[in-house]
Amino acid sequence: MKTLLPVLACILLAGCDFTVPLVDTPTLDLDKSAIGLWERPKTDGGQAERLLVLPLGKQEYLVAYTGNGTDSIYARGWLCKVADLTLVQLKWIGNSKGDAPDDTRVYQFASFTVSGDQLSLRLLNPEIVGRDAKSSAALTKAIEANKSSPALLREAMVFTKAKD
C-alpha cells in the first residue's frame, strides 16, 4: 500500500487498517441510496474531496475516492453484518496511476447513513478493535467485544451529493 498511502492518509485518516476481510463474498443487496457522486470541502480551501459510488452488480460497489483533485484510489465494497451493525467492507485495489497495493493492509470497514443529500461515513476504529486480527472470525469477535464502545467508529466524514 505504500504507493497509495499518501492519498489514503488524506481521506481515511491513517491508510488502510486491516489485513483480513469480515466476509469473503457479498450476501446482502446494495443500499442504492449511497450510489452517486459525493463531495466534501477541504478544510484548507483546496479542491473538494470526491467520493464516487457505483453499483458493480446487485451486491457490490465500485468506490473511487479523489482526495487531491487529480489522483483517485479505487475499492470494491459490499455490505456485511457484524455485532448488529451493517458495515460496508472496502478492499482497496489500486489507484489512477495503475499502482496496486504492495502489502496486505487493504481492508477498511465503515458504517454509513444517507439523509437527503448527505452521506455520513464512519470508519471502524482499529485503535479499539486492534489492527492485527489474523482471521475474519477474530476480527468479528473483536468488533462484538467492543460494540458498546462509543469510539468503535471514528468521527463522521460528511459528504454532500454533487450537483453536476
Image (spheres, rainbow, N blue to C red):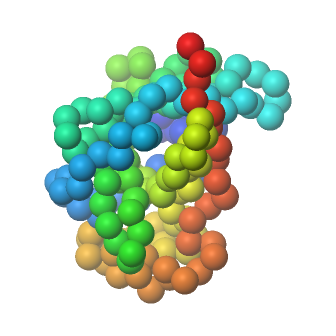
Residue that extends furthest to the right in the rendered view of this protein: 44
Residue that extends furthest to the bottom in the rendered view of this protein: 145
Q: Tell me: residue 83, above or below residue 30.
A: below
Q: Nearer the viewer, residue 56 or 47?
A: 56
Q: Nearer the viewer, residue 162 or 13?
A: 162
Taking the image as shown, residue 153 lies to the left or right of residue 73, namely right
Q: Nearer the viewer, residue 3 or 158?
A: 158
The N terminus appears in which quarter of the rendering? top left
Picture residue at 66% right of the left edge, 58% below the top: 155
Picture residue at 42% right of the left edge, 19% below the top: 96
Picture residue at 30% right of the left edge, 46% below the top: 30
| Residue 13 is at least partly visible in this image | no
Q: Position of residue 41 (x, y in %)?
A: 72, 30
Q: Position of residue 12 (x, y in %)?
A: 57, 45
Q: Position of residue 19 (x, y in %)?
A: 35, 58
| Residue 28 is at least partly visible in this image | yes
Report the number of numbered marks: 0
Q: Quadrant of residue 11?
A: top right
Q: Quadrant of residue 93?
A: top left
The C terminus appears in which quarter of the rendering? top right
Q: Tell me: residue 69, above or below residue 110.
A: above
Q: Tell me: residue 126, above or below residue 50.
A: below
Q: Position of residue 122 (x, y in %)?
A: 56, 56
Picture residue at 34% right of the left edge, 72% below the top: 82
Taking the image as shown, residue 50 lies to the left or right of residue 85, namely right
